[in-house]
Amino acid sequence: QVQLVESGGGSVQAGGSLRLSCAASGRTLSGNGMGWFRQAPGKEREFVAAFDRIKNTYYADSVKGRFTISRDNTKNTMYLQMNDPKPEDTALYLCAVRTTYYNHYSSQSDYGYWGQGTQVTVSS
């Protein structure tokens, strides 16, 4: 079983920066795709960024150029560097591990392990 714990969320002003972490335990995940998703109040969960199995990175258009996904396999930890956040980035951010590869990397159905999330609030 894999456990994922997100941290680093909080309140930030628009134009600032924040780094989220996702620490994994239970087994090594260096061979898995991993991703970040977010869910704002009253909205559906949406894709933010992801790695595939060969470490290519992908981003939602809304965060491209502002957010950077990275991982440290020695620590079994994934990160999301959020630069120039905007109020519309306010959401609960969740990390996930991809366990199947049937669909597009942004498809939540391919992610079998999820963390509980860390809240990010961006003020204008």
Image (cartoon, grey):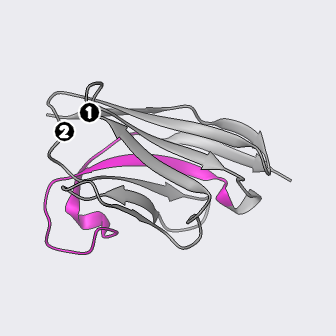
Looking at the image, residue 57 lies above or below residue 23: below
Q: Is residue 98 magenta?
A: yes
Pick whichever, 92 or 53, lies toward us. 53
Proximity of marks 1 and 2: CB atoms separated by less than 8 Å: yes
Q: Position of residue 47 (x, y in %)?
A: 44, 65
Dot 2 lies on which element?
A: loop
Q: Which residue is mark 1?
A: 73
Q: Which mark is residue 34?
A: none
Residue type at mark 2 is: Leu
Residue beneath the point at 25% across and 59% down: 52
Report whether 93 appears left or right of 30.
right
The N terminus is located in which quarter? Answer: top left
Q: Quadrant of residue 73?
A: top left
Pick whichever, 37 or 65, lies toward us. 65
Q: Residue furthest right?
A: 124
Residue beneath the point at 50% across and 68% down: 44
Which range is magenta? 89-116
Pick whichever, 103 or 65, lies toward us. 65
Report whether 25 appears left or right of 38.
left
Looking at the image, residue 33 lies above or below residue 17: below
Residue type at mark 1 is: Asn
Nearer the observer: mark 1 or 2; the answer is 1
Q: Residues within 10 Å of mark 1 (few under 14, many from 20)?
A: few
Q: Which residue is mark 2?
A: 29
Q: Is residue 15 magenta?
A: no
Pick whichever, 111 or 56, lies toward us. 56
Give the number of marks: 2
Q: Position of residue 121 (x, y in %)?
A: 70, 46
